[in-house]
């Protein structure tokens, strides 16, 4: 007679996921606005749009889905999940805001081969803390334990942000013209880009660990690689509310400056970027000095210190830089006539 087995025998312990959610309930519910209608644990997340729609003539919903990629591997190696949820929330909300939209809600998904309830709870709390900080409701999520799909002690983290924008106020780059200026808003690290290459260099080629000091710099590898993805969505909302006209917004994600800027300008134009127009923080100096990589590939793999690019009329340049703060941004380039529709790097 065949032995009867349980779900737990197959490597799935539903109780652990339930306990992780219970440990995070306070943080999750703290993100709720009056428009959240559902409670934690329902089959679907409900969010009332009645009051919000009263402020719009032609409302458009904007959604973005993203993950933290192999940055999670660094978090696992350092056993530091404090900011990994920040990375997820900001990666998605920044994309939503790049259209001119205001993020409203967030959903998260955490999966792994063998869920540790303490780790899962820490990740969810990190998501919730960043949602609350920027007025976004964490309306729902999912946890999944899938042995055989993920490697042992491996986790995956994915999220979806939804925002809203008045149709006439959508920022789509169609009004960009030659002579317009690119304002680069500084990043504080890799964000979630280029980790496969950075990890190979640091952990495999140089055989360093997260607790080691970054060679040539007075900062740990853990602090460099786990610096949380900067939130730009709240900044974009403040700029919009201040009445500063932004023609185009590029969130510098995978593909760096090289791939992301052409996505948000007309096809008959290019942008010339002066790579000396901002100071590089230690991690980028280190990567540039230790990788066998040409300049274009370097600026296509990593954000190289620029997390957001705002394109404005030249007459609005000083006003925008002053609004953001000169310690946080700089003029880094200009739009030019060029049907190659690309980024030209010089400096």
Image: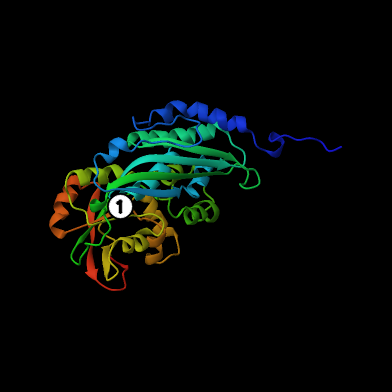
Which is nearer the eye, 58 or 237? 58
Write the residue at 35% across / 37% down.
136
In the rendered image, the residue lying farthest to the bottom is 339
Please count the marks in the image. 1
Q: Which percent across, then down, holds residue 171?
A: 26, 54
Whether residue 163 can be seen here: yes
Which is nearer the eye, 109 or 287? 109
Write the residue at 40% across / 67% down.
294
Q: Tell me the quadrant of the picture where the C terminus can be found.
A: bottom left
- In the displayed structure image, the side of residue 266 where residue 4 appears, left or right: right
Badge 1 crowding class, 10 Å Cα cut-off, few under 14, some 14 to 19, many 20 or more, is: many
- Which residue, given by chain and number where applicable, does mark 1 sit on? 99
State whether residue 285 is above or below residue 135: below
**Residue 204's quadrant in the figure?**
bottom right
**Residue 56's quadrant in the figure?**
top left
Q: Tell me the quadrant of the picture where the N terminus can be found.
A: top right
State whether residue 178 is above or below residue 158: below
Q: Which percent across, then down, holds residue 46?
A: 42, 36
Q: Which percent across, then down, holds residue 167?
A: 26, 51
- In the displayed structure image, the side of residue 293 where residue 21 appears, left or right: right
Which is nearer the eye, 279 or 64? 64
Write the residue at 38% across / 32% down.
36
In the rendered image, the residue lying farthest to the left is 315
Whether residue 230 can be seen here: no
- In the displayed structure image, the side of residue 260 where residue 315 appears, left or right: left
């Amino acid at each position: 007679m065949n032995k009867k087995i349980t779900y737990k025998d197959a490597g799935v312990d539903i109780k652990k996921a339930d306990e992780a959610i219970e440990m995070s309930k306070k943080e999750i519910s703290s993100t709720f606005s009056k428009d959240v209608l559902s409670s934690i644990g329902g089959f679907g997340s409900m969010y009332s749009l009645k009051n919000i729609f009263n402020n719009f003539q032609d409302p458009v919903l904007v959604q973005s889905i993203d993950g933290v990629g192999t940055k999670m591997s660094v978090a696992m190696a350092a056993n530091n999940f404090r900011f990994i949820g920040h990375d997820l929330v900001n990666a998605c909300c920044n994309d939503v805001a790049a259209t001119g939209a205001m993020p409203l809600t967030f959903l998260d998904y955490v999966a792994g081969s063998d869920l540790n309830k303490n780790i899962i709870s820490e990740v969810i709390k990190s998501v919730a803390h960043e949602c609350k900080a920027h007025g976004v409701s964490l309306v729902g999520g999912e946890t999944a334990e899938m042995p055989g799909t993920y490697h042992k002690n491996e986790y995956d983290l994915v999220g979806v942000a939804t925002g809203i924008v008045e149709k006439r106020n959508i920022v789509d780059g169609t009004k960009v013209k030659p002579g317009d200026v690119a304002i680069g808003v500084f990043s504080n690290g890799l964000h979630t880009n280029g980790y496969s290459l950075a990890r190979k260099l640091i952990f495999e080629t140089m055989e360093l660990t997260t607790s080691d000091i970054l060679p040539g710099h007075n900062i740990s590898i853990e602090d460099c690689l786990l610096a949380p993805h900067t939130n730009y969505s709240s900044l974009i909302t403040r700029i919009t509310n201040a009445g500063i006209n932004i023609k185009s917004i590029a969130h510098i994600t995978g593909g760096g400056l090289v791939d992301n800027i052409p996505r948000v300008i007309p096809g008959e134009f290019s942008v010339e970027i002066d790579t000396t127009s901002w100071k590089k923080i230690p991690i980028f100096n280190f990567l540039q000095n230790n990788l066998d990589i040409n300049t274009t590939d370097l600026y296509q793999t990593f954000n190289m210190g620029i997390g957001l690019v705002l394109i404005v009329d030249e007459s609005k340049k000083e006003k925008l830089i002053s609004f953001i703060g000169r310690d946080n941004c700089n003029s880094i380039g200009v739009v030019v006539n060029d049907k190659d529709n690309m980024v030209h790097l010089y400096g």
